[in-house]
Image (cartoon, rainbow, N blue to C red):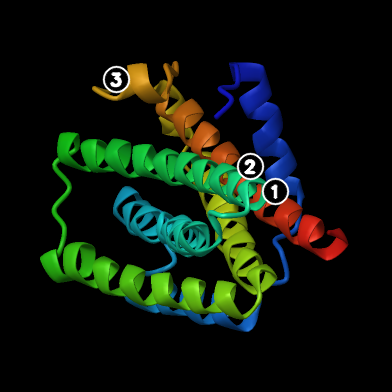
Amino acid sequence: MERLNLWELQKIQEETLKAPRRRYGFLSKILFTFMHLVYGKTKNLSKFKVLEVIARVPYQSWEHVAYIAITHMYRKPDFARRIFEFVKESRSQQDNEQWHLLILEELVHKKEIRENFFLYRILPQMIAFLYYHISWILYVIKPSFSYNLNADFEDHAEHEYMEYVRENPGLEKEVFESDFADDYGQFASLADLFRQIGYDERIHKQESLERIEHARFS
C-alpha cells in the first residue's frame, strides 16, 4: 500500500472531509446503526479496533470462494491464473487491514484503555462471523453485491478516521512509535498515522468499485 508524505496526507484528508459519504445500502445501514447503538457515535481507538476486526472478513470470504473456484477450474490455466491474481490482491488487502488492527491494539495497550471484554473481544468476533457469511453469500449470488457492501464499509471507515483527526487536534503533537512501524510505515504523528489508515480505506473502497465496473463490462 502506498505511503504518503505529510502534504499528501493532509490533502487526502481535506478531500475526504469535503466529499459526501456514499448512499449506503440497506445492510450497511443496519450494521452502522447497530455499531452506533452498541459503541456510541463518539470516535475512539477501541471502536476503530472493532471496525478493523470486521474489515478483514470480506477479503477472507472472497479468498475462500476464489480457492474453491481454482479447485474446480484448475484445468483451465488462464482462468485459474486470473483467479489466483485475485486471491493475491485479496490477501494484500486483508494484510493491510491486519496491520491497522495490530497498531490500534498496541495503542489501546499503551494508553491503558480499559475495555469491556464482551463488547470489545467477544461481540466483534460474533459480528465478524456474521459479516463473513453475508459477504460470502452475496458474492456467490452476485459479486457486485458483496463489493458494494464492502465499498460502503470502507467509505464509512475512511470518513470516520479523517473526522477523528479533525476532531482531535492534539493528535498532531503525539509521536507515532510502534513495533510495527517498519512493517506499516513511519509517521511523524498519530494524526498522520490515522490519515494514512483513512487513505488505505479509500483505496480499498476504490478497488471494490473497480471490480464492480470490471464485472459490468467483462
**In which quadrant is the C terminus drawn?**
bottom right
Q: Position of residue 117 (x, y in %)?
A: 12, 64
Residue highlighted by disc 3: 177
Horizontal and vertical percent for residue 147? 63, 64
| Between discs 3 and 2, the one toward the N terminus | 3
Q: Amino acid under label 3?
A: Glu
Q: Which residue in the structure is indicated by mark 2? A: 203
Task: Examine the rendering and report whether any part of residue 214 can be seen.
Answer: yes
| Three-letter code for the amino acid on which mark 2 is drawn | Ile
Q: Is residue 191 left or right of residue 18?
A: left
Nearer to us: label 3 or label 2: 2
Q: Callout 2 environment at 10 Å: few (<14), some (14 to 19), or many (20+)?
A: some
Which residue is pictured at 50% across the width and 64% down the height? 72
Q: Are marks 1 and 2 in contact (CB under 8 Å)?
A: yes
Q: Position of residue 57 (x, y in %)?
A: 41, 60
Residue drawn at 41 percent across, 28 percent down:
190
Q: Amino acid at mark 1?
A: Gln
User: What residue is at 51 percent from the left and 41 percent from the top?
Assistant: 88
Sequence-wise first label, 1 or 3: 3
Residue for badge 1: 206
- 20 in relation to 107, above or below: below
